[in-house]
Image (cartoon, grey):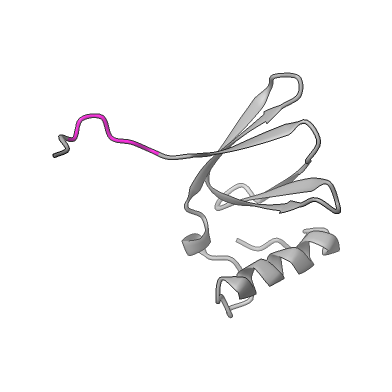
Amino acid sequence: MKHDDLPERWAIKLQAHLLELGVTRGRLSAEEFHYHLKLTFEDGSFAFFHYAFHLLDEELKEIAVFTEHCGYHIFPLFGTNLELLESKWTDVETE
């Protein structure tokens, strides 16, 4: 997915993140979107994101969520709680 309208402050951070991961293609691909995130806000409302990843910037006081199919979303860091969710199958027997 392209992020042509991503604010410059986040475009730089996204590029640095990709380089840290060893991604040299200069753009995102489906390989980067493997998390499920839940953000809960101060007022108790929340948002779920499937096939996403996030970046935090304490200096900007922002959190950016990048999704595979729905672009990016930028939220204030203050009053926002982030949870990484893990899927568990309940019908599989374990030893």
Query: Farthest residue in the top direction?
Result: 44
Residue 6 image position (x, y, % from top left) = 77, 59
Q: Is residue 64 left or right of residue 95?
A: right
Position of the N terminus, as image quadrant, is bottom right
- Image-quadrant location for residue 17: bottom right
| Total numbered badges shown on the rendered structure | 0
Which secondary structure type mostly characterizes the magenta part of the structure?
loop
- For the C terminus, which image quadrant? top left
Q: Which of these two is toward me, 83 or 37?
A: 83
16 above or below 58? below
Q: Which residues are magenta?
A: 87-92
Identify the image quadrant of residue 41. top right
Q: Is 54 situated above or below 77?
A: below
- Between 48 and 86, which is closer to the camera in this rendering? 86
- At a point 70% along the width and 64% down the height, the residue shown is 14
Q: Is residue 80 above or below residue 36?
A: above
User: Which residue occupies 63% across, 31% down?
Assistant: 47
Q: Is residue 48 left or right of residue 5?
A: left
Residue 53 percent location from the top left of the image: 58, 52
In the rendered image, residue 21, in percent from the top left (x then y), is placed at: 56, 71
In this view, the residue in front, 59 or 1, is: 59
Residue 68 part of the magenta-drawn span: no
Outermost residue toward the bottom? 24
Q: Is residue 87 above or below residue 19?
A: above
Residue 34, x across and y down, in percent: 47, 53
